[in-house]
Amino acid sequence: MTDNPIVIEELVKYYDGRCILDGISLRVPRGCIYGLLGRNGSGKTTMIRILLGLEPPTRGRTLVLGEDSTRLSANAHGRVGYVAEGHHLIQSYTVSRLIDLCKGLSLHWNDEFFGQLMETFRLPTDRKVKDLSTGMRAQLNLALAMAIDPELVILDDPTLGLDTVARRQFLELAIDVIQRQGRTILFSSHILADVERIADRIGILVAGKLVVDCSLDELKSRVKKLRVIFPERTPDDLYLTGIINQQAMGREMVLTVANWNPQKQAILQIFSPESCTEMPMTLEDIFIECTRPAGAVVPQESEV
Amino acid sequence: MNASRRYLVNALATGVIATILLCTGLFWARWLCSFDRHLLLPPSAREVVIRPSRRVAGEEGTDPNLLAPAIVTAAMGETQRLFYGLGAAQYLGSNAFPGASDGWRWLVRLRDEQSAPLRYDSSLGLFIYEGEDPYRHERDTRPTHHKFRHYAGPNGAGDKPDEKLGRFSSPIADPYAGSSLLVYDRGQKRFFAIQWDARGSSVRQGPELADANNHHPVQIGSIERNFGAIHMAVPCPTNVESPVLTQYFGGDRVLVLDASGRIDLLDVQTLQIAGVAGRLPTPMSPLGVARPVTPDDVVAYFALPFGVCNARQGPEWTYRGCAVATLSREMLAVEVACFDPNGRVIESGGTMFHEYGKSASGRVGESLRCSAQAAYYHLPGARSLTSAKLILESLHPPVLVLASYFASPHQEATAGFRSVLLLPDSFVAMVARAGGDMMWWERFGRVFCYMIPGLFFYGFLAERVARDAAWIGLARKTRKAWVVGTVVFGLPAYVAYRLTRPKGTLVTCANCGLGRRPDMEKCHHCGSVWAVPELIPPAWRVLGEAEQVEAASPSRAEETSQPTKSDA
Amino acid sequence: MLTLIRREIRDQLLYIALPCFFSVVMICIATMSYWWGVPAPISLALAANLTAGLFLGLCCLGTVQMHTDRAGRVSVLLSTLAVTRGQIFLARVLVGVLTLLVAVIPLVITALVLPGQIIPQVSSYRHVLAAVSVTISLAGFACYSIGLLVGWRTNRAWVLIGSILLLALVASLVWIKGFGVDAMAVLLLLIAAALLRTWSQFVSTSL
């Protein structure tokens, strides 16, 4: 039993000469539900595929359940449940045949739990996988991943392509399943409300780097969006480290700042603002602020 | 298995596959060249006729005015013979049809009695003769079929495989023998005569060969190899009233082929070598006369004894000599020689190509060229085929070409039809087998000349490999191994390199501007660490407590890429 | 492992049946030749053609096993279950071996039962039969291994052209080398190299 089921060390991945992941380091502790966020093409799926040994890393290394991802044993594979983006199931198989195959190739198969899931999802076992709807495939994939009693669950955008109702149903079941069994989960999604509901810890990938890696509460407390009104016009020489975004309009300036702390507040007070109001931020707001293109960020030159 | 070991395994496996498949492809290309070259030869260049007339005793018969001149003709077989040289055809030819020996078990079958096979059982060390005797009468009643099986060993024959019969060790015998089988036992170095009879067989033992070290018989009786690849005939005059010269069917003398190529005469009565009957003549090779040949040096040979039979006085035969023909390795030249009863050459000749053209002095005339050389250099289209052959041999792995030089003198002549990796019929191998007084350095010089095109080609490939390997940042040791490998193993090594070289697009180094491998920590050109200018991550980080400490001291790569954007 | 083997057999049933079909045809022809007394050259020519069919069938099996996997991303699912890629590959190869045995063993038995039909009037029949059947089996397996190697490519045209070309080369090795130990050694070397390279590619490429 390892304390960190997922360990990523200085992971670099290039595709056709293009850098996707640039020196990512990450540890996901046991029992943690980790929400991995990022825009399209930011490298979330690549990172997950590298973790599962489906893709070789360009540099660096990844460990899953204490084993190197490039040489994962059958035992380690059997302890990881994976729901892939797009649900890579064997399309030509019938559902029952696929179930038989997965059952035959699992270390543990929880028949009772799997039966419950199948009953809830009402999946037709006699139909071919390719004839199932996207939602049904997602449900089947989740059921198959959960039936093996995995120590680690990796969900790569599992709700992609689902309608709102199916997504909600899927998510509720997933949350129920996940929370009930207390597993370590790596969860990637674009539906931030979903992530906000279930994640303990958040990671955000921007430009190949993991710019956010902390607990959800910590993230909310450390990233602040402030509306500052100055007596006259906004100062040109307001230098703060960790400015994520800054917009000025006349006397008003809207600042999004990372790692907000008393020192930064003191620096802001030097410019004697008339008022400084904190604007409430949801995870989605934080994500949007964090993933804005780099050009939109005002370059920072001074050091606090 | 770690990455470097996997790379090595992958490179070796790819090399082996490339070598086998490439050599197989080259084999067929060379085979087609041989086939075409064989087709070039006109019928006149495929046949040789010698007339040892008046030098063979017995030509005249009883009437000195009537002469039955001795004419010996020998011709190479059809082009289809090239198919029969291929391994599968040869295997089936020598194993699946009666009257031949094979690597598994020696076997002969009596020519007249298909139902009574005669064979050698190597586990018993005995010859076995079995069949049915349909004419055995018991108590004067109707004939009954009596099954019998006789065993014959060096000490005698019997109905049971008794130890008293002794054991033959590695015997040879005439596969076309009749009821009297002549056997030479290589272990005991003596001849035996086994007389088979359904009602009781007997074995006669000859004395041990006097000069046993100089005698290594390989064939007795019918001296022939690859029957059909070479046709040979001596005239059989129809005048049976007088003793005439014809093919010898007498039983007193039998030809014995020695491993050295010499043909001895065996006296069947005494089972001793009675003298030398002749030797295998040496056919011309495209590079000139080869060394004296052994049975393994020629694709086919055939020896035909002739003698005088006086029909009036009964089946009385007098041995008068023999004619022997051989077919060269390339199947492009036949050499025939006629020997007198003492083994001296009376007449010899080889297949020739008659070329008509102007000489240097401007005279139109006929010149004779050896058929093998004509097929390589003089016939229309021959030079193109020769060039193609040289190119194909140059594409072969150089180490195997060189190995062919050393191996070819020890490879039997038909090996070229089945050899994928070595080249027993290459120019280099011809040099190795060439006769004459060539010094070793002269031989190597000629070998080098033939290898020059290949060496140039592989030098060029090795240079490309070296440049490419440096460009993609292979380690110096690996680079050297690939360069040496390409020079030594040639095209397969190059193919293996191309198929196993690190894949992926090179990334422009921010420091030196050259392409660098993404999977290496430092640029293999300038040694600089990574900078990814196309990615501009923000300077800030929101990391957990532990990570914040780490983030306070950014990595070197980050320092290089964004020296002014460090966060607290 | 058994589950993987069962899956392979069920998925590739048609292609497993193909070499067996050629084998059955060969058995039928040998039996009919025995009763009708077909001349040796004709039965040999038929046997040679059907053996080429057997090689083709085995090569197809290897190619299809790898190509359908890559195209249908079967191994993506399999390798996230409790198996390694090495095991997936091994199961695949075992199915190839099984197919070969199923195709060749009845043929050998027929040749033993009806002596002289496949290789007529053979002297030391069993030795020749052993040499021929071992060489043919090895050549068939080499064709299968080459199929595996070529089938991993994604481009269909390359797969088709490559497998036909390489199949012709490998099958022609038997013509060149015959049925002796030499042929067996070369074929064994080729099989080992082809399997090693395919395995190396299969376990290291991204799925």
Image: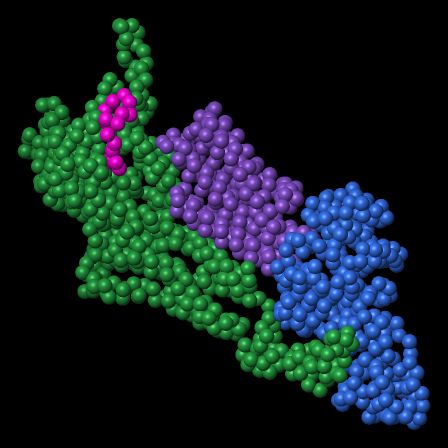
Chain colours: A blue, B green, C purple
Specify whether residue B171 is painted magenta: yes
Q: Nearer the viewer, residue A43 or A153?
A: A153
Quadrant placement of the N terminus of chain A: bottom right
Q: Position of residue B411 (x, y in %)?
A: 30, 50
Q: Nearer the viewer, residue B548 or B82?
A: B548
Read off the magenta span.
B157-173
- The residue located at (67%, 73%) in the rendering is A23
- The residue located at (60%, 83%) in the rendering is B511
Q: Position of residue A50 (x, y in %)?
A: 67, 63
Q: Is residue B113 visible?
A: no
Residue A182, by quadrant, is bottom right
Q: Position of residue A22 (x, y in %)?
A: 68, 73
Q: Nearer the viewer, residue A183 or A142?
A: A183
Is B375 on the left-hand or right-hand side of B1? Answer: left
Is A286 on the left-hand or right-hand side of B193? Answer: right
Q: Is residue B89 visible?
A: yes
Is A297 on the left-hand or right-hand side of C45? Answer: right
Task: Report the number of discs.
Answer: 0
Specify whether residue A88 is painted magenta: no
